[in-house]
Amino acid sequence: MELHNLVEKVSKKFFITERDIRRILSALMTSDDIWEVIDLADVPVMALCEVWKALEEKGLVEVSDKRVSLTAKGLELARSYKISPIRSFTCKLCEGRGITLAGLEKVEKRFKEIAKNRPEAIQDYDQGYILEDVTLLRVALMWQKGDLQGRELLVLGDDDLVSIAAGLTGVAARVTVLDIDDRLLEFIQDVSEQEKLGIEVIKHDLRYPLPENLQRAFDTFITDPTESLRGLKAFLGRSLSALKGPGSAGYFGLTRREASLQKWQAIQRFLLERGAVITDILDDFNAYVNWPYIETMCSWEFLPVKTIPKRVWYRSAQYRLELLGEPGPDTEIYSGDIFFDEETATA
Amino acid sequence: MELHNLVEKVSKKFFITERDIRRILSALMTSDDIWEVIDLADVPVMALCEVWKALEEKGLVEVSDKRVSLTAKGLELARSYKISPIRSFTCKLCEGRGITLAGLEKVEKRFKEIAKNRPEAIQDYDQGYILEDVTLLRVALMWQKGDLQGRELLVLGDDDLVSIAAGLTGVAARVTVLDIDDRLLEFIQDVSEQEKLGIEVIKHDLRYPLPENLQRAFDTFITDPTESLRGLKAFLGRSLSALKGPGSAGYFGLTRREASLQKWQAIQRFLLERGAVITDILDDFNAYVNWPYIETMCSWEFLPVKTIPKRVWYRSAQYRLELLGEPGPDTEIYSGDIFFDEETATA
């Protein structure tokens, strides 16, 4: 049994490297919880399920009492490749994000009170929001980088409630939110009025170009795109078109759970072509609250063990970019479903 | 006085955006030490000196008792643009790097004893090494990502002594070092023999392609390139050519002190063209020990205040990449000086 045979087998359906298989085996030596394995493996869920199938056919993995593990034969294979459990050096204080909320306690307290009444995530718009702390940390990151204070901020899709956290700091010159979901728009509007945050709330479907008055109008955008390649391009193309020009900044999340590194590469190319440069990629910065529709998401039927996750397993990297040139026109209309491609797992 | 006029003036010599000027003004509101301002401003030193000149001509900045500051007029301008001091949320435990050395104490202790006798940085090869903790953190990062244990590692240029720290962990399958500096090669060779680390030490000038037997031979590379565009391409091109193929990983430092974001963009394009994808960009991960030749470095004469830095001011982002395709042949020979271009400051 050689790892490259597994690569060849799985590659017929998904982009995968020998390194990915190593990482999956390493994850299986680290945890027996399927969701932790998915979290640690850093390959798309759908690809991991396909690898699992191939490993199972060869008798290398097994499920027992809803726990996943390598068989004796699987362990032997892993060891023959010098694969070992994942060794973590993640900072205990900031959990690897590099920043903390020290100094933001008042905003934190108010934000968490407000968020208690937020609308629940729904599948219709591929929603799934991040931990409240992470929403606040995104705002802290923008502030530290000089992209919040005195700056005009556009939030494209806001089930994470970034606009409210940003508004509560009181330092942004303007906060505008676009979303397609009336529940969210109403919630943000109500909070903004009660708290006097002055957030502009606009209904918009990102499959269509931004209204003229929002193009080239902002210093900073933040968004958490849907993960299909078409969806990513739609969200990021609109976002870039909202920026004033050179020196404007953008923030977005990109996951490994539903996007292969091949997709990452396509997105990086797309950003460079549109005149941006990537300044930061912070792995696992974003951690998501488990959403209520997990059993109806498209990858559920392929999972080797059907259990509800008890802890955070869905994470994404936080990207930051700066624009060096003009983003150019953004006129494409994306018809139909932009949430789904062969790597997506939660749509 | 408008910021865009300053941009136009400075742009004749350096790539700069209004955002960069804002950041410089913000840095000048945060510290009166020229080296801290350089550290915080995140623009090339040479560009900052040019901005300083333009600000000085307009009476917006001044030097007094070797301290830099905005004049009353400068402060007024900054405030009219809603510019304020830089707000930091950097984690106090990991200093923003996301990882710590917890669990690596034995390696840390031995490495620091060994490093006491290291060769000093010299200008001939544009040397300047990182803090000992950061060398160890680079190794921890590679370990965590699965790029050290059981893997074959190539270090291209090693005044940072990464090979020794990696060797001391005892988990790498192979550690090979290339350098041009006989002092370093001898030092690493001697340590390797004393400590039984089994490091391979090879003399090589990176202006020339790698020897055949080192091409397509490694799982992981790590390097800290010289900062000219030609130098970056030479170091990274050689590094990529050493990798086995898809799934192999690479680590390198890229600074803002001697590289504009335009140069960053060119390097990102170069990496994507060579079949790589960028997986991590960790800002200010690398912190450098002040080198002894600071007063003869090429930017010295342009500095508004000639003082020797007392603290760390030179930092770089840590990049990580993975190879998705084949890097292709790397046959170019780089003649002459590869250390210098118009943005470099330390050559």
Image (tube, coloured by chain):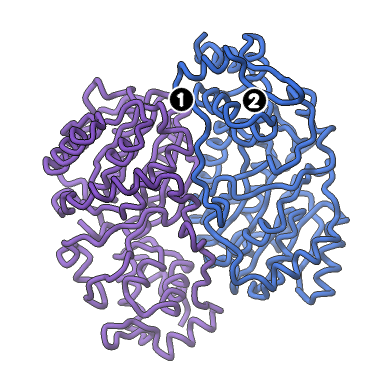
Chain colours: A blue, B purple
Q: Amino acid at mark 1?
A: Pro
**What is the quadrant of the C terminus of chain A in the image?**
top right
> Which is more toward the observer, B205 or B274?
B205
Specify few, some or many for label 1: CA neighbours under 10 Å numbering under 14, 14-19, or 20 or more.
Answer: many
Residue B185 pos. (x, y %) = 16, 38
Residue positioned 25% across, 78% down in the render: B305
Q: CA distance from mark 1 to mark 2?
A: 18 Å
Write the residue at 53% across / 11% down.
Answer: A5
Q: Residue at x 72, y 63 (%)?
A: A163
* Figure disc tally: 2
Residue A178, compared with residue B38, is above or below; it is: above
Q: Is residue A108 above or below residue A261?
A: below
Report x, y in % for residue A252: 62, 50
**Same chain? Circles 1 and 2:** no
- Badge 2 density bin: few <14, some 14–19, many ≥20, Cα 10 Å: many
Tell me: residue A316, above or below residue A168.
above
SS at mark 1?
Answer: loop
Q: Which mark is residue A48?
A: 2
The residue where tag 1 is placed is B246
Position of A113 with respect to B197 (left or right) is right
Q: Are marks 1 and 2 in contact (CB under 8 Å)?
A: no
Q: A272 or B253: which is nearer to us?
A: B253
Please state which amino acid type lies under the numbered disc 2. Answer: Leu
Question: Residue A89 bears which disc, if any?
Answer: none
| Protein chain holding label 1 | B
- Residue B347 lies left or right of residue A93; in this view the side is left
Residue A212 appearing in the image: yes
Please state the horizontal and vertical placement of residue B222, each as a whole percent of the image.
34, 39
